[in-house]
Amino acid sequence: MHLSIRKLLGPKGRFARLCPGYEHRDEQVQMAEAVTDALLHKEHLLVEAGTGVGKTVAYLVPAIRHAVSGKPVIVSTHTINLQSQLVNNDIPLMTTVLKSHPFRYALMKG
């Protein structure tokens, strides 16, 4: 599955082709691979990464692929602003880039 992560997030990958201004980041690919491994092996993962690494994309891509395979995924955010960013920007971007992996999502507040 790492090969397909690299095909999506690599310098000439799907994100680079479909998202104007996308910049390949090795740290983002490494994080996405670590998230993929954690999901596959049902393990916990703690990641610390600086600003500009692309953390949201790095966890959303593997999470969506995991969900498409029939396994539930919950993304919990620390702030309402991040929640809004996910629902209004990042997830719609994912539906465009990951067209071959259609998925559903819902926003829960409480």
Image (cartoon, helix red, strand yellow):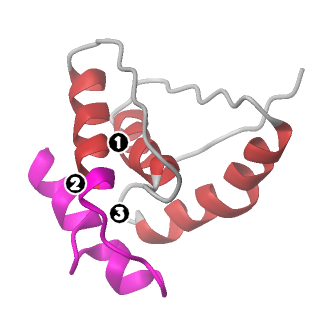
The C terminus: image quadrant: top right
Q: Nearer the viewer's eye, disc 1 or disc 3?
A: 1
Quarter-wise, where is residue 16 in the image? bottom left
The residue at 75%/60% (across/down) is: 88
Q: Which residues are magenta?
A: 1-28
Q: Amino acid at mark 1?
A: Pro
Residue nearer the viewer, 92 or 24: 24
Residue that badge 1 annotates: 62
Crowding around mark 3 (Cα neighbors within 10 Å: few <14, some 14 to 19, many 20+) is few
Q: CA distance from mark 3 to mark 2?
A: 14 Å
The residue at 33%/35% (across/down) is: 69
Looking at the image, is mark 2 or mark 1 earlier in the sequence? 2
Judged left or right of residue 72, residue 30 is left
Residue 5: which numbered mark, if any? 2
Say whether marks 1 and 3 touch (CB < 8 Å). no
The residue at 57%/25% (across/down) is: 74
Q: Is residue 71 above or below residue 12?
A: above
Q: Amino acid at mark 2?
A: Ile
Residue 76: which numbered mark, if any? none
Q: Nearer the viewer's eye, disc 3 or disc 2?
A: 2
Mark 3 secondary-structure assignment: loop
Judged left or right of residue 89, residue 9 is left
The N terminus: image quadrant: top left
Residue extending furthest toward the right? 110
Q: Is residue 59 above or below residue 12?
A: above
Crowding around mark 1 (Cα neighbors within 10 Å: few <14, some 14 to 19, many 20+) is many
Looking at the image, is mark 3 or mark 2 earlier in the sequence? 2
Residue that badge 3 annotates: 100
Say whether marks 2 and 1 touch (CB < 8 Å). yes
The residue at 43%/41% (across/down) is: 49
Provide residue 92's location: percent of width, then percent of height: 63, 63
Q: CA distance from mark 1 to mark 3?
A: 14 Å
